[in-house]
């Protein structure tokens, strides 16, 4: 996705969170980031929580404490008492085919404004990703910058929520971009995609 498209989706996601009363200081259980770390929707939600100052978590133990849960087509592990946004993970954020009763379909974000609201990030000392190894804003602000395209594929050391957060922060610092590959087409290799996208495969260990 181009940077402008990512920005538009992050803006829409922040507005959707705001519509649900979720923002700075609230805990958001990103089950979708845990189950699909290399999907653009997961990246948009992670960036949206950072922009709004919410605390994203991929810890199953945070499922019941969250103000909002975000899942893919399979919402297993989300507490049914917590408001849920369900993402189809279809191209262009198409609607869910078999949504959980009462869930908010992420396709509703399409109706949200494109304009980015003012940022309200959490303090740098607070947690910016709750994981087995939690990260705060200060540690993310100090990651090495990523200056060019970097390809990350399923099975790579970088294909985890924590490392994706590091790489996203690096792109924000260095103006780089991520090429995320969940699966390849028949007969296509990761190396071929990397050459086609002129993307590096370096820097994939935390």
Image (spheres, helix red, strand yellow):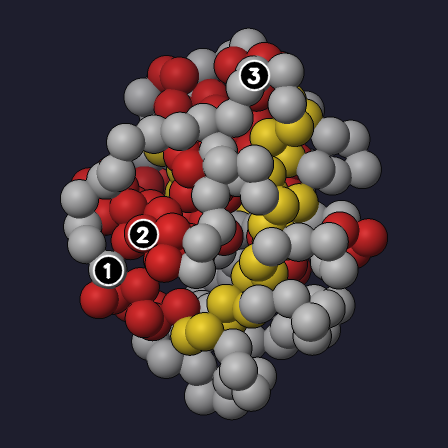
Coordinates of residue 47 in the picture (x, y in percent): 43, 39
Which residue lies under the disc numbered 2?
A: 15
| Left or right of residue 83, residue 3 in this image | left
Which residue lies under the disc numbered 1?
A: 112
Image point (45%, 54%), residue name: 21
Q: For numbered disc 1, what is the local secondary structure?
A: loop
Quadrant of the rendering where the C terminus is positioned: top right
Q: Can the viewer see residue 92 in this picture?
A: yes
Image point (70%, 37%), residue name: 130
Image point (82%, 53%), residue name: 61
Rendered view: 104 above or below 54 = below
Of the image marks 3 and 1, the number of the one nearer the N terminus: 1
Coordinates of residue 200 in the picture (x, y in percent): 44, 29
Q: For numbered disc 2, what is the local secondary structure?
A: helix
Image point (64%, 23%), residue name: 126
Circles 2 and 3, Cβ within 8 Å, touching? The answer is no
Q: Can the viewer see residue 9 in this picture?
A: no
Circles 1 and 2, Cβ within 8 Å, touching? The answer is yes
Coordinates of residue 161 in the picture (x, y in percent): 63, 42
Numbered circle sitting on residue 124 = 3
| Left or right of residue 195, residue 191 in this image | right
| Left or right of residue 66, residue 165 in this image | left
Rendered view: 165 above or below 29 = above
Q: How far apart, in angstroms, are the residues tagged by discs 2 and 3?
A: 23 Å
Q: Residues within 10 Å of mark 2 (few under 14, many from 20)?
A: many
Q: How far apart, in angstroms, are the residues tagged by discs 3 and 1?
A: 28 Å
Q: How far apart, in angstroms, are the residues tagged by discs 1 and 2?
A: 6 Å
* Relative depth, front residue between 18 and 74: 18
């Amino acid at each position: 996705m181009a940077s402008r498209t990512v920005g538009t989706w992050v803006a829409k996601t922040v507005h959707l969170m705001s519509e649900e009363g979720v923002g700075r200081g609230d805990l958001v259980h990103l089950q979708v980031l845990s189950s699909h770390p290399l999907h653009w929707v997961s990246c948009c939600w992670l960036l949206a929580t950072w922009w709004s100052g919410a605390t994203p978590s991929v810890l199953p133990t945070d499922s019941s404490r969250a103000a909002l849960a975000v899942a893919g087509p399979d919402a297993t592990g989300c507490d049914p008492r917590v408001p849920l946004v369900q993402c189809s993970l279809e191209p262009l954020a198409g609607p869910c085919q078999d949504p959980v009763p009462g869930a908010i379909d992420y396709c509703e974000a399409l109706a949200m404004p494109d304009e980015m609201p003012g940022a309200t990030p959490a303090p740098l000392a607070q947690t910016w990703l709750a994981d087995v190894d939690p990260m705060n804003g200060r540690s993310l602000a100090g990651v090495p910058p990523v200056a060019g395209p970097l390809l990350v594929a399923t099975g790579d050391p970088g294909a985890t929520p924590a490392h994706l957060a590091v790489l996203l922060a690096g792109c924000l610092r260095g103006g780089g971009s991520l090429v995320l590959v969940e699966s390849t087409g028949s007969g296509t290799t990761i190396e071929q995609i990397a050459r086609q996208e002129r993307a590096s495969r370096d820097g994939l260990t935390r």
